Image (cartoon, rainbow, N blue to C red):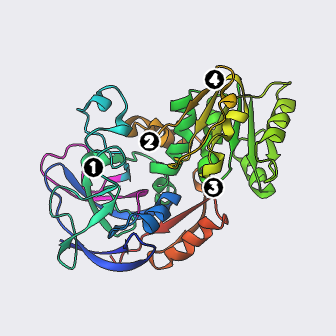
């Protein structure tokens, strides 16, 4: 049993640092000494809307502290990145190659948004405690299924940068590379240049896109986007609600035709249909940010032969994709360190959420401090 500081929420907008107990891993489980946890808009949604008590956090990296019976993927001392879309490897979706929407383990498509490991994994004042997305990364320790971790391998990747791979990086990059399968020489438009958008831009760059057009309300964010691979920037206006002017500017850049692909990375429900206004006939629009609200669509936006997709988690296969991201980083072809604008502690997490919600940072990370 480990004593562990953790960020606990009631799911009604309140959160605080508490001391919890984290048990030994059961069969097929591993206990992780967490070193860093990314701060994500989904975390804030969970804090304000889930209406139950649990450990916050679903982006994380750390060191294997203990392993249960039958664990073969990792050993004590391994550095790992955590994955919240945990595959079982046996259900219909896993066998079809869609491990990110596992019918058995997915916290989104399965048995709820939270969950605990099979053993006496986590307790608060003697009562079982759930963890966000089966992980609860804003804590010193957690117990997870072995399928939830991927070894970092031989790399100098800092834990702070590694922690964000398991959601924000993968969602943006994977939506471009895995879901849309962007073709070399194409034109890509990315709407929203926060953390997810910057990774979509990097995905377009790695896919060989000829023109990568960043779109945002902030001139500062547009300049930052160019450092991550954008070839052009368009400063949007709130008055251009139907994105007609933005679409016309894209056509000017692209020789009279709108983009081949457009990615919505804002998480603003009103912009759910926006990528359709930015693509040519026969183009592909991708809703990256996971909007889960009713949206009315003008069917004329689909003319003609346009495709609209809403992939989860960049169609991530963690065993395949995490090592790809790490290798790109190792070779100097992926900017991860530069994504981390600011770091916090568990005690200053409120500042991190405020910075994120106010748009002051691309990505914030909580550094998990340990006494030993």
Quarter-wise, where is residue 92 in the image? top left
Which residue does the image show at 49% across and 37% down from the upper left?
A: 311
Which badge, 3 or 4, comes first in the chain's sequence? Answer: 4
Q: Is residue 266 visible?
A: no
Residue 78 painted magenta: yes
- Where disc 4 sits, the SS reads loop
Percent of width and height locating residue 336: 57, 51
Which label sits on residue 111? 1
Instruction: Examine the image and state in which quarter residue 36 appears.
Output: bottom left
Q: Which residue is mark 4?
A: 183
Q: Earlier in the sequence, mark 2 or mark 1?
A: 1
Mark 1 touches mark 3? (CB < 8 Å): no
Residue 322 is marked as: 2
Mark 1 residue element: loop
Magenta segment: does it hold 93? no
Q: Which residue is mark 3?
A: 338
40 left or right, relative to 257: left
- Alpha-carbon span between mark 2 and mark 4: 21 Å
Distance of mark 1 from mark 3, alpha carbons? 36 Å
């Amino acid at each position: 049993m480990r004593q562990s500081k953790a960020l606990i929420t009631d799911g009604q907008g309140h959160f605080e640092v508490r001391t919890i107990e984290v048990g030994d891993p059961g069969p097929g489980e591993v206990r992780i000494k967490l070193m860093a946890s990314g701060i994500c808009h989904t975390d804030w949604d969970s804090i304000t809307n889930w209406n139950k008590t649990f450990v916050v956090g679903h982006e994380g990296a750390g060191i294997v502290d203990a392993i249960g019976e039958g664990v073969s993927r990792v050993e004590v001392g391994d550095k790992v990145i955590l994955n919240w879309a945990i595959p079982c490897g046996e259900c219909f979706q896993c066998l079809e190659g869609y491990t990110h929407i596992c019918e058995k383990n997915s916290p989104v498509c399965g048995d709820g948004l939270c969950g605990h490991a099979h053993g006496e994994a986590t307790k608060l004042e003697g009562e079982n405690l759930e963890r966000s997305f089966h992980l609860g990364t804003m804590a010193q320790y957690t117990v997870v299924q072995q399928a939830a971790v991927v070894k970092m391998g031989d790399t100098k990747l800092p834990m702070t940068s590694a922690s964000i791979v398991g959601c924000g990086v993968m969602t943006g990059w994977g939506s471009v590379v895995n879901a849309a399968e962007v073709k070399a020489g194409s034109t890509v438009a990315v709407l929203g240049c926060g953390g997810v958008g910057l990774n979509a831009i990097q995905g377009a760059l790695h896919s060989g896109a000829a023109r990568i057009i960043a779109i945002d309300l902030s001139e500062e964010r547009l300049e930052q986007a160019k450092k991550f691979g954008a070839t052009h920037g368009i400063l949007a206006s709130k008055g251009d609600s139907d994105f007609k002017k933005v679409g016309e500017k894209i056509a000017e850049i692209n020789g009279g035709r709108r983009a081949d692909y457009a990615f919505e990375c804002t998480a603003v429900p009103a912009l759910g249909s926006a990528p359709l206004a930015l693509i040519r006939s026969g183009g592909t629009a991708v809703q990256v940010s996971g909007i889960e609200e009713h949206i009315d669509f003008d069917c004329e936006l689909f003319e003609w032969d346009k495709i609209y997709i809403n992939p989860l988690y960049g169609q991530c296969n963690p065993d395949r994709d995490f090592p790809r991201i790490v290798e790109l980083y190792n070779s100097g072809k992926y900017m991860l360190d530069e994504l981390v604008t600011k770091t916090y502690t568990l005690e200053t997490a409120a500042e991190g959420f405020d910075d994120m919600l106010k748009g002051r940072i691309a990505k914030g990370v909580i550094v998990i401090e340990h006494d030993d």
